Amino acid sequence: MGKALIIGCGGVAQVTIHKCCQNSDVFSEIMIASRTKSKCDEIKAFLEAKNVKTKIHTAQVNADSVDELVALIKQFSPKIVINLALPYQDLTIMDACLETKVHYLDTANYEPPDTAKFEYKWQWEYRERFEKAGITAILGCGFDPGVTGIFSAYAMKHYFDEIYELDILDANAGDHGYPFATNFNPEINIREVTANGRYWQDGDWVETKPMEIKRVYDFPQIGEKDMYLLYHEELESLAKNIKGIKRIRFFMTFGQSYLTHLKCLENVGMTSIVPIEFDGKQIVPLQFLKAVLPDPATLGPRTKGKTNIGCIFQGVKDGKPLTYYIYNVCDHEECYREVQSQAISYTTGVPAMIGAMLVMNGAWQKSGVFNVEQLDPDPFMDALNKWGLPWVEDFSPVLVP
Ligand code: NDP
């Protein structure tokens, strides 16, 4: 039993909040603190009307300010801070956790606002300070990064002597009916997909142009989809933490219409993060684009179809070659019925609750800064089945060429 402070009240946070309230034995009290307090009050009222047992508090906070965060943490004294704001706030929130000696968890690596780098280096630099303070920081505890790292730890622990190749496949066959919208924060999503691709091969990074490498894969329960090689942040930590790995690639599915819209927006300069002057004000085109696109939190009631995210491993066990595919299939409409959110937010928000629970109950409490694959996957894997993200195993999958 304990208290958790949740920062942010967007698409992902709303799922985590629902899930913490379903798990009131662990999360007896939560505080939801975000930039726009009315969103926190709205979900609190919604959940209180359902008579949830978890006691809910709300607050306004600017998570760019360490002082404001420290004051809030001192006032509420949680066991853990669950950071579900944006990647720009990771370091200020980690600083505040250090100052107050409270555990930390997030779902995305720190990004400086002016350059999209997708690197853990800033957060890994906190390792010694977290060790000395005797507190835990869990990095990247959504689905990808997050469950993909847990799947990797599970494969290493239970099935393989050595893993040589890993392909992470992220398919979304959801349809929200809009000509163009992103399933999570548009700014972060578009920065990710317009960046160069990159994969790990024989001890080095191989860089590709955006969307240069395309494959077609027949996904269980979803069917055949076009998918493209992207760089994704978990590749950096998995390349370090899966000993002997020779190749890691990440593929995400995109429909032709999404890509055509994106190309057009890119061609006219709307995806740029370089500020321009407009009407005497500095504006960032990508932030303006975010303001005109549908809010991902509103896609829930409109989205139909399923997601399938998983990992295909190739390696050896007892001297014999072994392939292993493990994935989760999540249905957008079922997620909406349960927590009023679509599956992208659901698949991120549920693992954030599970990771926080494992820190709260001690199973994942270790001093330092950790990527999820560095921790024991077993209690997490059990919790995935229990809390809405069951997984499926296949020992003879079709491989990605
Ligand atoms: P949203 O934009 O929907 O929500 C972000 C929330 O953070 C909003 O409530 C926003 O406030 C709040 N916020 C932003 N800046 C501040 C600030 N300075 N101070 C306080 N609150 C702030 O994003 P998502 O919910 O879609 O994504 C949340 C996180 O999850 C992101 O970091 C994203 O990258 C990550 N993610 C991870 C995935 C994974 O699998 N690992 C998958 C999808 C997302 P306001 O309401 O005022 O805008």
Image: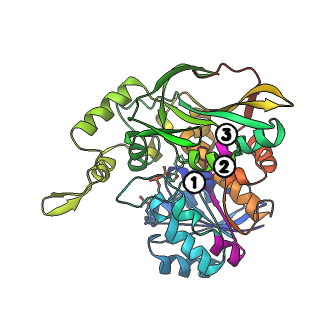
> Which mark's residue is nearer the viewer, 3 or 1?
3
Judging by the rendered image, the residue that carries numbered circle 3 is: 245
* Residue ID at (63%, 75%): 129
x, y percent for residue 345: 55, 45
Q: Which quadrant of the figure has residue 356? A: bottom right
Tell me the magenta residue range: 128-149
Marks 2/3: CA–CA distance: 25 Å
* 74, above or below 191, in the image: below
Q: Residue furthest left?
A: 279
* Residue ID at (36%, 29%): 259
Q: Secondary structure at mark 2?
A: helix
Of label 3 and label 1, which has the lower sequence position?
1
Which amino acid, mark 2? Pro
x, y percent for residue 327: 68, 32
Q: Secondary structure at mark 1?
A: loop
Which amino acid, mark 1? Thr
Of label 1 and label 2, which has the lower sequence position?
1
